[in-house]
Amino acid sequence: PQPNPQAGAAVKAADRAHVFHSWSAQGLIDPLAVAGAEGSYFWDYDGNRYLDFTSGLVFTNIGYQHPKVVAAIQEQAGKMTTFAPAFAVESRSEAARLIAERTPGDLDKIFFTNGGAEAVENAVRMARLHTGRTKVMSAYRSYHGATSAAINLTGDPRRWPSDTASAGVVHFWGPYLYRSPFHSETEQQECERALQHLEDTIVFEGPATIAAIVLETIPGTAGIMTPPPGYLAGVRALCDRHGIVFVLDEVMAGFGRTGKWFAADHFDVTPDLLTFAKGVNSGYVPLGGVAISAEIAETFATRPYPGGLTYSGHPLACAAAVATITAMEDEDIVGQAARLGSDILGPALAELAERHPSVGEVRGTGAFWALELVRNRETREPLVPYNASGEANAPMAAFGAAAKKNGLWPFINMNRTHVVPPCNITEAEAKEGLAALDEALTVADEHTAQ
Ligand code: PLP
């Protein structure tokens, strides 16, 4: 693409004048003006191209501008751009069928939303109505969205300014061997102690007051901590024992990201409710939803479900989901993610960890990896403190700037960088990104103290 700095300046000027950005101090940000995107790359108006190791906000599982999905959106726009949610509409019916066929177990009914937070919001509403209880439990080190129930469930600093004490949320610690609060030395110990901690919390909260436990199957933004074998099955058993609805949040981990359709497939567990968004149509048109078990669906068979959205199951978004799922099937994009993890990213990142003293741990699966950057491998002191900003965050900022200088757009959260490219990134592209990451890590290495 031809550089066009003048056009870029106009886009930037209108943005700075009128766009109010998420999570930001409006006067302190400098958003890049993006001219276009294709596959695993995007570019600005000045002739700079970036390899996107973030998949947007981890949603472009099939990359940007997939031609089949773009064509399906165009076709649907020509046929039926929009329609109200109370009607049976072809693209909505078909999207629900394709999703239900892939979600685990008996999760066969789909309630559509516009995104992930609304999916979580409605899953909580369903659980409360189904059980007649109000309290909901979730993990520290989690993100569930920025609406009322979802932000209260969230276990990271984004919750703090929006916390409402009346929300009825109780947080607990999930398993995280690298920074275990349970003094565990093995995965099995970590699993047992995390389950014991959860059970103790349930008992002391009062099992009969708890409507739901909401967990990311593999926590995403919080650090891609794959739970040890047996943990999710243990949570399932606790939920069954106490009549608690088990909600798995697969907004980030679902739709191929981990090398299976859903992360729950790795653990052979079926939740009562599963929330999804992002990868369902790679974010081409806003869409999310809740997949609902037979038992919970039955609760609302004769009793009206008291929740809805004007754009629930929007025809354009659903057509994008149908085309995305079909393309993922035709091109084996889930298999591509699995092989990307096992054959390319896994070995290459392990090798980077050996050479770079700033890499404390590498963990992940499929197209879903985290590198934990540390000042000291022995003490595991993070490269920057928890929730650091300004000067305290300078080492991570320097790492990020170095990656961008090398044409790599990195995902950064606190002291971690996540390697979360599109599931169908090519081997050559992945290697290009890994080379840029290698160079950027030398900048992080300069901030280590060992
Ligand atoms: N749940 C998880 C696990 C997420 O990662 C996110 C977004 O990052 C959400 C929920 C919220 O989704 P949305 O931003 O579409 O509301």
Image (tube, grey):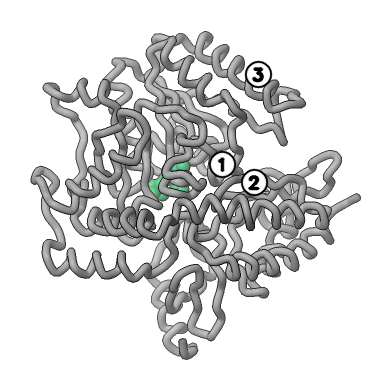
**Residue denoted by label 1:** 157
The reply to whether residue 311 is visible in this rendering is no
Q: Amino acid at mark 2?
A: Asn
Q: Amino acid at mark 1?
A: Pro
Marks 1/2: CA distance? Answer: 7 Å
Marks 3/2: CA distance? Answer: 26 Å
**Residue denoted by label 3:** 193
Residue 160 lies, in percent from the top left, at 52, 38
**Residues tagged 1 and 2 counted as in contact (Cβ below 8 A):** yes
Residue 257 sits above or below residue 130 on the image: below
Q: Choose between 340 and 273: the one closer to the eye.
A: 340
Q: Choose between 366 and 180: the one closer to the eye.
A: 366
Q: Choose between 139 and 161: the one closer to the eye.
A: 139
Marks 3/1: CA distance? Answer: 25 Å
**Residues tagged 3 and 1 counted as in contact (Cβ below 8 A):** no
Label located before the other in sequence (3 or 2):
3
